[in-house]
Amino acid sequence: MSSGAVHKLQGAETSLPVSRREVLAIAHQLHQRGWVANHDGNISVRLAGKRWLLTPTAMSKRVLVENDLLIVDANGRVLQGGRRPFSEFKMHMAIYDARPDVQAVVHCHAPAATALSVLAVEVDPQLIAEAVVSLGDRVPMAQYHFPNSAEAIAELRQLAQDHDVVTMQNHGLLGWGDDLEQAFLRSELVEHLATIQQRAMLAGEPRRIPRADVERLLEKRAHAGLGAEGRRRRGKTR
Ligand SMILES: [Zn+2]
């Protein structure tokens, strides 16, 4: 495709349905932030009728335009679009299966969070008060498994019950939420925290805030309707 055609389609983004416009905007952000390289990273949004809107495989997030997006069913079969879905859709489906409330999933290889994951170190929200409210007292790290293996999928399903963003050892970040913006913001916060944590680790030993305060922050979190406890209080199905 010529760059002129790309420009024209990007100019037309404002007239696209919100879900498509958002997927393109977030995909471009993933690249601009340096959270993906080459063909890394993928995005999905749940649509009505057991369908999902996806970024395609084997394309840079830098150049995606509307025609590149595709719609698939729960098995990843293409219902609309000329490109192929990414194989990591299985990872996304693990989250959607475990959490009927989740509407969007973002996957990227953001470098600070991924650097900690190759050290097998979890990103620790207990370093910053606001992070505990937004993310809970833990951002768990899924153990290394062969990509898309049954073990990898089973662990993600398990972690999705109580968490909204995880790192995956020797791999990257996976975040989800009520909408794509929330899934992206959770990923952004984890990457920011990981950057702070990494810098602190270079200079010394990071100190957590007191546990009693973490408990108070977790109560604020539940009160705000966030996390498993917050969802329970909101009376949402999981
Ligand atoms: Zn990946």
Image (spheres, rainbow, N blue to C red):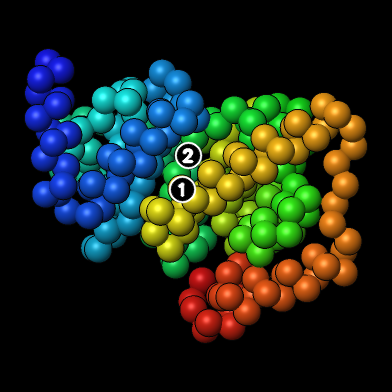
**Residue 176 visible in rendering:** yes
* Residue at (13% x, 36% y) in the render: 11
Residue 225 picture quarter: bottom right
Quarter the N terminus occupies: top left
* Residue at (59% x, 79% y) in the render: 232
Q: Is mark 2 within 8 Å of ligand 1?
A: yes
Task: Relative to 107, say whether 84 is above or below.
Answer: above
Q: Position of residue 174 (x, y in %)?
A: 53, 43
Query: Is 228 left, or right, of 10 in this rendering?
Result: right
Q: Are marks 1 and 2 in contact (CB under 8 Å)?
A: no
Q: Position of residue 160 (x, y in %)?
A: 58, 57
Residue at mark 2: 107
Query: Is 53 left, or right, of 40 in this rendering?
Result: left
* Residue at (29% x, 48% y) in the render: 22
Amino acid under disc 2: His
Label 2 crowd bin: few (<14), some (14–19), many (20+), radius 10 Å: many
* Residue at (43% x, 63% y) in the render: 178
Amino acid under disc 1: Phe
Residue 77 picture quarter: top left
Whichever of callouts 1 and 2 sits on the residue coming sooner in the sequence is 2
> For residue 184, which numbered disc appears in the image?
1
Q: Nearer the viewer, residue 207 or 17?
A: 207
Query: Is 68 left, or right, of 113 in this rendering?
Result: left
Q: CA distance from mark 1 to mark 2?
A: 9 Å
Q: Position of residue 46 (x, y in %)?
A: 33, 56
Q: Position of residue 236 (x, y in %)?
A: 49, 78
Task: Relative to 42, say whether 73 is above or below.
Answer: below
